[in-house]
Image (cartoon, rainbow, N blue to C red):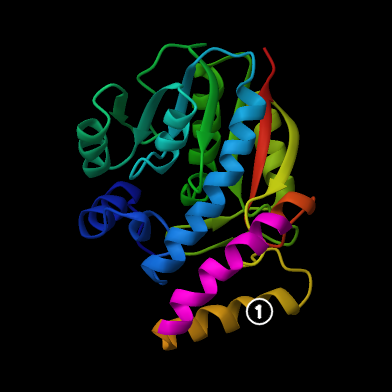
Amino acid sequence: MATFNAEQYWENRLKQHYDLVGVGDISLSETYNRWSYKVTRQILLRLFKKYSAGKTNNVLDVGSGTGFVIDVWKTLNKQATGVDISTTAVENLRLRHPDYSFFRCDIGKEKLPLAQNSFSICSAASVLYHLVDDESLQSALNNIYNVLEKDGIFIFSENFIHEKSFLTTHQKCRTLAEYEAALQKSGFEILGRVPNYVLMNEPMDARTKLTPRIWNLLTHTSKKSGLFDKIIWPALYPVELLLTSVLKESPAQEFMICKVIK
């Protein structure tokens, strides 16, 4: 099997789709991606407000892509720095946000070009599962740990499955236990997890057949019917916000919150 070249993959993908489809689920529509990112925005606003209280304004975003998370930080008047593996992403981000700093870096293989202990919070939304080998994941976590200050916060999203991990071409779905071990090895303390999605994302950690059936029905029908596609995702948006606010765990993607121990 050929070695996966993450830099080339994302460079090609973002050159073709420098939008939410390119950084989101490329198999689904612009409507789906727009509304799913609206959900993520609300979750991030809630988490960022809670965990940035009383901390310095210097924050880091890993895997900045099209700047979706950067825009959330900007809403909160934080001084954000972004890194991405793609030159296309970094060039576009510098044009769009000339008041922020952006660097091209493969965080799993290269040292971050940033000072140690210089950020109060780091975000990484839908990023770490694209590090398909475990050595790269550990290197990325070490990188993030080093640039965060004492008691700094790391917020990232993953599937945190409970069964056996598995690998696709450009993703590795790791278990919750694997993440717990890797984070502890790097020096992080896990503070908790919250759902990112419940119905509007593939249920990689489903324990029953119901949620995969719902997801397959929604996505299959939305691909077949443009009208259904335009109606169902905005209709599910308030439902998803409610579910993510009341549930403690999800069969789909979740955010984990960690603290630096130094």
Magenta segment: does it hold 230? yes
Indicate left or right for 154 with 128 as reference: right
**Does 3 sit left or right of 142 as displayed?**
left
Please say whether residue 176 is visible from this viewpoint. yes
Can the viewer see residue 161? no
Element type at marker 1?
helix
User: Which residue position is annotated with label 1?
Assistant: 214
Q: Is residue 147 left or right of residue 216?
A: left
Residue in view at x 52 percent, y 33 percent: 123
In the picture, which quadrant includes the N terminus? bottom left
Q: Decide: few, some or many residues near mark 1? Use Cα within 10 Å; few <14, some 14-19, many ≥20.
A: some
Residue range of the region highlighted in magenta in the rendering? 227-243
Residue 217 sits in which quadrant? bottom right
Residue nearest the observer in this picture, 134 or 82: 82
Q: Amino acid at mark 1?
A: Ile
Q: Percent x, y for residue 216?
A: 58, 80
